[in-house]
Image (cartoon, helix red, strand yellow):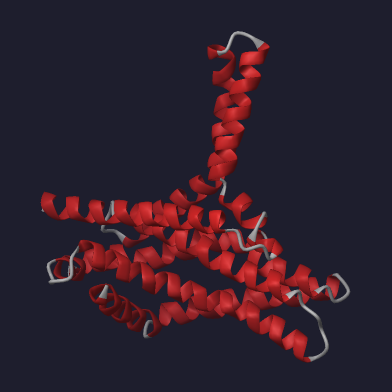
Amino acid sequence: MSGSLVVARRELFGLFTAPFTWIVLVVVLGLNGMLFNAVLAGTNGSIMDALSNVMAGPLFWLWMVVLPALLAMRLIAEESRTGTLEYLLTAPVGDAAVVTGKFLAAAGFLALLWTSALLYAGAVSSVGGAPDWPAVLGTWLGAILVSSMFVAIGLFASTFTSTPLLAAFLAMVACVLWLALPVLIGEVLGYVVPLIARTEDARQLVYERASAVLTNMDASTHFERSFKKGIFDTSEVVFFLTWTALFLFLTARSLEARRWRG
């Protein structure tokens, strides 16, 4: 674990000394702030609606596609292009420690980004507003878990190339596919099920079971039915941590395979 922390500290230092990172921070915080103010004004001061749009609305899910890809491009592909990744992988820390350290740096960066919503809630509360703090804190925790999972997906996708722009594109595609997976599989089932199930009862049974599986894979559903409501459900936490761990494992194995291929 100490090796992971060393790598994480190195990556965080690199992130916060890069002009690109500060540009991303300014753009994201600026757009989130304008969205918060716009929703607050448009809903006659509904604090929770404003916060929900910042940490759970369409713009949030757009950030889930874009930001992990940009971070993965910086942490994996850019270092692979310059040769520093291979040097790091040969250091006495191990592939898993390198991947974990890079993940902690990227996830920590996004966690810091979402903490701005707590500042919004605190600012409104200081002037007489009454935010639902359990829902605010639950949404904040959920946003961190969601972004951590997408960071892991982005890191895994970016290991397949040393070209930064291509790595960012692959990571974005992977994140979009994960978000759209329930819809895509549902569309495929609409064509496949009638071919394999002859009776109406059989088709209904397949649809019901497939729907249950797809719901359990839908990140937005897991996020909205617990964290967004201020409900701390350990099963939802396990869902995000399990998928995050799986994609980090795949990332480590992919980097190891690349090294063996030379």
Q: Nearer the viewer, residue 154 or 136?
A: 136
Q: Residue at x 36, y 80 (%)?
A: 12
Q: Locate residue 157, reporting x and y percent.
A: 36, 52
Q: Locate residue 199, reporting x and y percent.
A: 64, 9
Q: Is residue 204 left or right of residue 145?
A: right
Count of number-bearing discs: 0
Q: Nearer the viewer, residue 89 or 211?
A: 211
The correct choice, above or below, for 48 with respect to 183 in the image is: below
Q: Locate residue 232, reporting x and y percent.
A: 62, 63
- Taking the view exactly as shown, the residue that stands out farthest to the right is 44
One can see residue 168 in this view: no
Q: Residue at x 37, y 51 (%)?
A: 246
The correct choice, above or below, for 28 with respect to 244 in the image is: below
One can see residue 92 in this view: yes
- Taking the view exactly as shown, the residue that stands out farthest to the front is 234
Q: Is residue 179 left or right of residue 248?
A: right
Q: Is residue 183 left or right of residue 96?
A: right
Q: Is residue 159 left or right of residue 128?
A: left
| The N terminus: image quadrant | bottom left
Q: Residue at x 53, y 60 (%)?
A: 146
- Taking the view exactly as shown, the residue that stands out farthest to the top is 198
Q: Locate residue 153, reporting x and y percent.
A: 41, 55
Q: Residue at x 32, y 76 (%)?
A: 8
